[in-house]
Image (cartoon, rainbow, N blue to C red):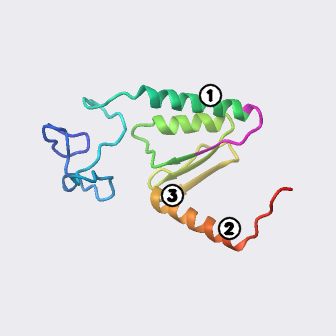
């Protein structure tokens, strides 16, 4: 069987890392094979719908919209969403149009839509970028005394 990841899949639909050059993909801790991403692919016969996750996401979006209408700040941190399947980017852009801040991290397509002031485009790998942000925040927290509200 042909895998959506570019290699040939065995009877269980499992692909070996070396077949797809997946050096940075998550691997199964038990067998070492490439773990299946939780993404609906084209002609995906192995997709398992997760209604609970879908409901939680929709609930989060509704709450974010309500929060923005009451003046709360919502930040969408999007990492690694490309242009081939634009669903994630479309959702992020929609929330940004409603007033959410948008931080987009992507090696190839980091650009955020024009028209908003709270948008940040970061060209880089998600893991490396988040580690750098964490390190910078840690240094900042260690060098700056925190002010506590009384």
Q: Which residue is mark 1?
A: 62
Q: Label 2 crowding class (10 Å Cα cut-off): few <14, some 14-19, many 20+?
A: few
Q: Which residue is mark 3?
A: 123
Position of residue 59 relative to residue 5, above or below, is above
Q: Return the residue found at the far front.
A: 150
Location of residue 126 in the rendering, given as x and y in whole percent from the top left corner: 47, 56
Q: Nearer the viewer, residue 73 or 7?
A: 73
Q: CA distance from mark 1 to mark 3?
A: 29 Å
Asked if residue 70 is among those painted magenta in the image, a careful observer would answer yes
Q: How many dots with numbers?
A: 3
- 12 sits to left or right of 106: left
Figure quadrant of residue 122: bottom right
Q: Nearer the viewer, residue 37 or 105?
A: 37
* Residue at screen point 62% across, 28% down: 62
Q: Return the residue found at the far bottom.
A: 143
First in sequence: mark 2 vs mark 1: 1
Looking at the rendering, the stretch of residues picked out in magenta corresponds to 69-76
């Amino acid at each position: 069987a042909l895998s959506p990841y570019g290699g040939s899949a065995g009877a269980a639909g499992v692909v070996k890392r070396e077949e797809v050059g997946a050096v940075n993909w998550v691997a199964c801790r038990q067998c070492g094979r490439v773990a299946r991403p939780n993404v609906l692919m084209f002609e995906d016969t192995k997709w398992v719908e997760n209604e609970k996750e879908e409901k939680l996401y929709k609930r989060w979006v509704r709450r974010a919209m309500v929060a923005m209408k009451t003046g709360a700040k919502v930040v969408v941190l999007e990492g690694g969403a490309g242009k081939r399947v634009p669903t994630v980017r479309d959702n992020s852009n929609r929330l940004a149009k409603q007033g959410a801040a948008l931080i987009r991290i992507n090696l190839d397509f980091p650009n955020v839509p024009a028209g908003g002031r709270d948008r940040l485009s970061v060209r880089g790998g998600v893991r490396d970028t988040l580690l750098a942000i964490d390190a910078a925040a840690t240094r900042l927290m260690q060098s700056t005394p925190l002010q506590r509200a009384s």
